[in-house]
Amino acid sequence: MKLSYHGHSIVMLESNGSKAIVDPFINGNELTDLVAGDVEVDYILLTHGHNDHVGDTVEIAKKNNATVVAPVELAGHLEGKGLETIGMNIGGSKSFEFGTIKFVHAFHSSSFTEDDGSIQYTGMPTGIILEAGDKKIYHAGDTGIFGDMKLISELNGPFDVAFVPIGDHFTMGIDDAVYATDELIKPKIVVPVHYNTFPPIKQDGETFKSRLSTTCQVLNPGETVDFN
């Protein structure tokens, strides 16, 4: 299994001959190493409907004939754009070629802004748990800290890797992310995400790392998680 980070909240999973990408915000993301037209995946997994997470889903899905797996309201919205979708909801799980996913709570909001400025409600925001091979991965999505992160970990972990937002302003900042990681989620490895993409979310990943007791890998776009 290969697990890589590509800037903002983009994560790529390659397992069992299948590829999935989480929250493919590429165009407009100066930090990513990806080019939307070059991405080859079988599945697109979305945590919520904000434009900086849905990103280039339509282009990538149509080019690859990829299936979009998302919260049910967001899936319905994207189905209306001609995509093949699977709508899920919090607490639900489903197996795919690459592994199993489960949607869990995130404390945030979720809507999509169209080019004409109209806003579409896209259901509840989520985190995603991925099980691939013998690895368990938690992508927390966009979220503030909440106590049930501990319950999520106890019921679904222990997690080999957790992707946790640290950008502040729209999500947890470093203070809350340190507590969430060390005291609630308790993964073997944590990777900070959702920071430095825009001025309001400028943060230092190394500062986050220095304050943790959990092993932290601060990844540059394109780098892979080292499980060793």
Image (spheres, grey):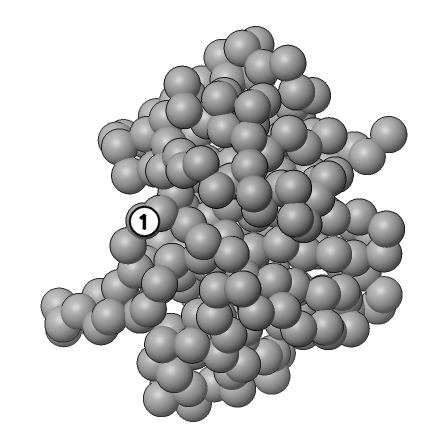
Task: Judge whether residue 61 can be spotted in this image.
Answer: no
Residue at position x 49%, y 12% in the image: 207
Asked if residue 193 is positioned above or below residue 179 in the image, the reply reads below
165 on left or right of 100: left
Position above or below: 142 against 175: below
Residue 31, horizontal then vertical, whole percent: 46, 39
**Residue 30: percent from left, percent from top:** 41, 42
Q: Is residue 161 visible?
A: yes
Tell me the residue at 36%/76% (across/down): 73
Q: How many marks?
A: 1
Q: Which residue is mark 1?
A: 108
**Quadrant location of residue 101?**
bottom right
Task: Label 1, secondary structure: give it.
Answer: loop
**Could you tell whether 169 is left or right of 89 in the image?**
left
Q: Is 226 displayed left or right of 124 in the figure?
A: right
Q: Quadrant of the C terminus?
A: top right
Residue situated in front as seen by the camera: 225 or 106: 106
Percent coordinates x, y for residue 14 in the rendering: 76, 58
Could you tell me the amino acid type at mark 1? His
Q: Nearer the viewer, residue 31 or 20?
A: 20
In the rendered image, the residue lying farthest to the left is 117
Instruction: Give the residue furthest to the top.
Output: 210
Q: Residue at x 40, y 34 (%)?
A: 145
- In x, y percent, where is residue 86? 54, 81
The residue located at (38%, 58%) in the rendering is 125
Q: Label 1 crowding class (10 Å Cα cut-off): few <14, some 14-19, many 20+? A: some
Instruction: Classify 115 as above or below 201.
Output: below
